[in-house]
Amino acid sequence: MIVFLRSLLFNIAFFGWSTICTFAFLPHLFGSVEDMARALVLWGRGIDWLLAHICRITVEIRGREHIPTEPALVVAKHQSAWETIALHALLDKPAFVVKKELLSIPLAGLIVRGSGAISVDRSAGSRALKAMLREAREAARAGRPVVIFPEGTRRPPGAPPAYQPGVAALYAQLNLPAVPVALNSGLFWARRSFIKRPGRIIVEFLPPIAPGLDRRAFLAEVEARIETATEALIAETLERRKGGGDRPQAAAAGSGESRE
């Protein structure tokens, strides 16, 4: 019952904060991508604050030394809405590869567009791939990391992987290091779930994969790295739950000192 009430309060606060931010950020549509990036960092930090203080969900960042400071391809596991928010604060002006449908959402679609996201029209076939590659190259030339969720949609923890070939095309065309990212966010903020369960979200940046592999080898390598690390994070979390150690001590801990 307590988890339900906390989840209810969080959802109310989440949509309230997001609505305030959406209207507050509209003037940035007339500014630069950098202006919108800073605004989205504020939005993401606010969401993490709400998670910590209402839902008792804290965040731990591992592998900070692998967070790119130069243009790179960031290939992230996708289990939850959380990473679509949090990665804005962890990366420098990221360019997300997103579904074109997101641009049609009233007001919020304008924010996505203003962030310099790379939209993909899945119904357009090869034309969509060419457009994605062109926009990704432009983002990389501007010094921005390109973020892609290689499975294309959120997958629940433990679901069989479904990596798409688009990520291999990006890797080949950009000729940049690819940084795999593993996480366990789906255990706490599950896909299409109202309930937000207390505990510790862990996101782990893994050692980069150097450019130069052929597409097939890269796809196999990035999937193996992400899936192995993600399975380990899930197993660690479930083991901690068994021992009763996956309950944050206090909401006052904010997003967790490990974020700082």
Image: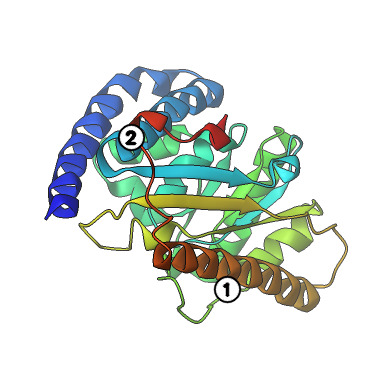
Amino acid type of the residue that numbered disc 1 sits on in the rendered structure: Gln
Residue 40 coordinates in the image, percent (x, y): 43, 30
Residue 22 coordinates in the image, percent (x, y): 29, 29
Amino acid type of the residue that numbered disc 2 sits on in the rendered structure: Ala
Q: Quadrant of residue 70?
A: top right
Kindly state the secondary structure of the residue where label 2 is placed.
helix
**Outermost residue to the right:** 212
Whole-Å distance between the Cαs marked 2 and 1?
38 Å
User: What colouring method underlies this structural image?
Assistant: rainbow
Residue indicated by mark 1: 164
Q: Please give the name of the residue rendered at 57% of the width and 29% of the height, measured from the top-left corner.
A: 260
Q: Is residue 257 above or below residue 122?
A: above
Q: Quadrant of residue 77?
A: bottom right
Residue 100 coordinates in the image, percent (x, y): 41, 54
Q: Is residue 145 left or right of residue 233?
A: right
| Most foreground residue, 120 or 92 | 92
